[in-house]
Image: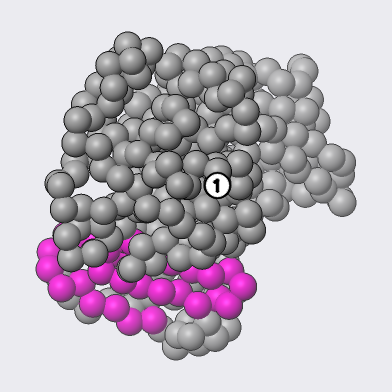
Amino acid sequence: MKFLLQRNAKKFILLLMVLFAGTLVFGSDTPDPNYVTIAGSLQSEVGSNGDWQPESSVTYLNYDPVSKIWTNTFTIPAGDYEYKAALNNSWDENYGLNGVFFGANIPLSLAEETPVKFFYDHETHWITDNVNSYIVTLPGDYLTHLGASGDWQPEFLGTWMQDKDGDGIYTFITTALPAGNYQCKVTINESWHENYGENGVPGGNNITFTVPEDNGEVFFSYDSVSHILTITDGAPKGNLNQAEAIWVNQDTLAWNINVEANYSATLHYSLAGDLAISADGIDGGDKITLTYEPAGLSQEVLAKFPHITGYTAFKINPVDLDKIPIILDGKNGVALFNEKNELLDATA
């Protein structure tokens, strides 16, 4: 599902056609692959008989059933390359930059011959390497609860933190821990060589946290600039990197979410792209109020897009329609609040 933001009617129609064709894919929508290939302009440099070959076993990644991460390392000569992750020896399912289905090629520039390790997570579809991205893990005294053979292992990818949108904030979430008190640190590139402790201090004290109940959701967020790790009970509600709302016509948004009459919704937008989810909603930029439409989506809309039957309809107020060109030019998000003005969910 997508929140379709377009600059003109023609683009709007084309995007809706893409939506209707069902081209947006999430991890839960596709079965686990049997093969993942690094397919790109680097393949002939590491032994394949050509480039952009999704069927080449030379650049297969290897699957770890414990961490559920696919990896492999290839020594690549100096040069500028591009690649993607191709699944099951075909281009039928492939992921590019930022884990986007049929997304842009991922650039890789090497000043000298370099062993490059590639990583793919089928749950998030993030495909990256240890040149373009920090490989951030969270060794601690709890790793055996996640399936590791021992604790304090920086190479254990069961705690791999991911920065799929490239904003420098790496996140990891788990519900696998029993209630108790724990310690961890942040390590970079699967080694203790670069590690950060309390308050982002290099080699600093262990970071402590508490899980109040068995299998409670624990959310880890690492800022790669300040090196500070934040740990909270549960992830922030919503995800601005996952589009679940759909702009179905000029003044109507559809969202597959349950709403009561006393709930409220807001549409946020920012030309600077500085929107972020907080405990209070979506911070940054400007916003307009959306109106819940209890009658639901119109028959005209459902006739065009029957697959969104049952979605909740939100209307843009007539006084805000002249803001649409500005809204469409920047980053966008929709937030839903309950009768106490508590954030329930947010999406792009």
Indicate left or right for 96 with 157 as reference. right
80 relative to 48, above or below? below
Q: Inspect this view and state whether residue 157 appears.
A: no
Indicate left or right for 284 with 141 as reference. right
Q: Which residues are magenta?
A: 207-236
The location of residue 22, given as percent across then percent down, is: 43, 19
Q: Quadrant of residue 210?
A: bottom left
Disc 1 marks which residue?
323
Indicate left or right for 3 with 143 as reference. right
Considering depth in this image, is 99 or 144 the residue closer to the camera? 99
| Residue at the outermost front position | 319
- In the picture, which quadrant includes the N terminus? top left
Q: Inspect this view and state whether residue 331 appears.
A: yes
Numbered-mark total: 1
Considering depth in this image, is 154 or 335 the residue closer to the camera? 335
Q: Quadrant of residue 127?
A: top right
The location of residue 116, given as percent across then percent down, is: 69, 46
Does 65 lie within the magenta span?
no
Under circle 1, the secondary element is: helix
167 relative to 227, above or below? above
The location of residue 336, given as percent across then percent down, is: 29, 52
Q: For label 1, count other residues whose C-alpha is less than 10 Å away and answer few (under 14), some (14-19) or many (20+).
A: few
The location of residue 216, given as percent across then percent down, is: 18, 62
Q: Amino acid at mark 1?
A: Lys
Does 224 lie within the magenta span?
yes
Q: Residue at the location (45% across, 85% down)?
A: 198
Q: Residue at the location (29% across, 78% down)?
A: 209
